[in-house]
Amino acid sequence: MKKKRAAKTAKSKTPKAIKPEEDWLGDEAEGENELDLGSDDGEGIDQAPEEEEEAPPDDDEPPADDDNEAGDAQMGSRILARVAEGKQMDLTALKQEIQDDAGLLSNWRKAQELGEKRPREEVFKNLVSNCSTYFGYSEELAEYFLQMFSPETAVKFFEANEQQRPLTLRTNTLKARRSSLLQALTQRKVQVDPIGSWTKVGLKVYQSQVPVGATPEYLGGHYMIQSASSFIPVMALAPQQDEVVLDMAAAPGGKTTYIGQLMRNSGTLFANDLRKDRCKALVANVHRLGLTNVVVTNLDGKKLSKMLPRLDRVLLDAPCTGSGIIARDPSVKVKRGQKDFESHSRLQKELLTAAIDMVDAGSKTGGYIVYSTCSVAVEENEAVVDHALKTRNVELVSFTSAVNFGVEGLCKYRERRFHPSLNLARRYYPHVHNMDGFFVAKLKKTSNKVPERAKKDRSKMEDKVWGEEHWTSDFMDSVVDFEESNGSAVTKKKKMTARDRKKQRREELVKARGYQQKYPPKAKEESAQDSTEPLRKAKVKSLKKKKEKRALDQDAAEAPVKKTRKTNKAEWATAAVAFELKIKWSLVVQNILER
């Protein structure tokens, strides 16, 4: 029995030859319509400074046998547990039961009409248990994917993760052309073809009689072994010549060397990685591919803003749980869960915030940040980008001019609601695009200012449900007053304008200060004398004002008269002096004549 199982396990590990006529990306439109609703090389996986976990395999390393054995042991233990319970285990029958339950859940209303008596929760729980047993996932992770996708799509996702992804290469255009490389590899009995029309440097390997990672072309730096999904973040970043660019989680160098290739060895390219052991492979690949504009650093990504200048573009292939590369790292099936998604999400938010702060919004050619992961979990993808949109002055932009395929990002997932522009992000699935699961989002920085406070998240506001538990005695004894209306229904209160609010505030202020109206209305029983008192006081007051005015007018009339009298006295004095002088002269003249 053990020999047969070992032979079966060895047979499953042997990679199947990919047929040339097999479609690389599959029927893209068909796959995307089936959906109900990221880092191939593990460049940024588990890079958290707090805990260093085992990273998924790199581009040029095959999946570890220990991981496959762990997955086989997990599946075997589940099967033995069922046998111990007395249940006969038939994998074919189990697979058929999974398909039947998935079909029931996808058409639940029709299934009930046809006589399905089990409740939906029981069918879903049975599907989770069967998928966990058949595909080797933990029940927590299997339930997560069954809730994320429709049941039938989730089963396709599980099946796609059991198939090995095609081996792909990226041509280094600094040293070779794709056509010449294809010809050279063909002469070495390596069967290769271009990946597709969406990339001009990719090649996929169907069959090889020599190690692809040991050919003279590989050692000479003519190509890099790299999964097709990791081309997309660099194509979305679209680095330009003479720019200052940062690859925040660079090892082992697949994306870094592609960025330097697009920059044509101009400008400055910073390649950072937290783990020192992975930086060795990064430096080796940089030298092998002939890049001369790369500066390799071994620092914490959250502290890079204090050490680097303002950047034009940043690529953050963030550390993640690797839930999109289960085909290359089967250990993810049993070692990852909801807690891992949440813990990685916190680190990713910090790294993305640091990446945004390093970019110069005033850059003439840049100001862009590309965020990517090799995970399909919402907590590590849309939730992280949504947090950046709330805490920094950035906006999502489309990159369909560089990559024109992919599934739109999720704007809502179960009870969560994200920013509407997240439909500009792109998701890539193994069961749709025949490549590793990936998430890519491109951000444009609009201002270097950091908002004082984050925008309020209204998507998490819970509506209060008034159930029977709220029917307390105080609530039931309370009285509710309704406004009277002409019709049978109560009319809604008219919305107040700015003028109405101002008038209301003025009235409240007058009331608070104790002012009254100038002529307050009197009651009917008051006497006539009391009613005429205000009029009498007003009349006396007006008479006083008239008297004062009359006195002022009189003073004003007398003022010019007094001035005239003063002027006449002066004239009389002058005239008297003149007359006196005239008399004196006449006397003098008379005396002279007499002599």
Image (cartoon, helix red, strand yellow):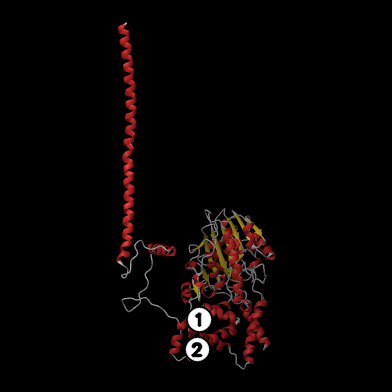
Question: Which label is found at residue 552?
Answer: none
- Image position, residue 340 (x, y; %): 61, 74
Disc 2/disc 1 C-alpha distance (Å): 19 Å
Query: Residue under circle 2?
Result: 119
Q: Residue at x 52, y 86 (%)?
A: 121
Please name the amino acid that badge 2 sits on.
Answer: Pro
Give the farthest residue toward the bottom: 86
User: Which quadrant holds the C terminus?
Assistant: top left
- Image position, residue 141 (x, y; %): 58, 79
User: Which quadrant holds the N terminus?
Assistant: bottom right
Q: Is residue 566 left or right of residue 23?
A: left
Q: Residue at x 38, y 66 (%)?
A: 496
Q: Is residue 13 left or right of residue 487?
A: right
Please name the amino acid that badge 1 sits on.
Answer: Glu
Q: Residue at x 55, y 89 (%)?
A: 93
Disc number lying in front (2 or 1): 2
Q: Quadrant of residue 65?
A: bottom right
Q: Judge by depth and name the residue closer to the eye, 87 or 454.
A: 454
Q: How many marks?
A: 2
Query: Residue under circle 1?
Result: 152
Q: Considering only vertical position in the picture, is 126 above or below 462?
A: below
- Image position, residue 57 (x, y; %): 64, 71
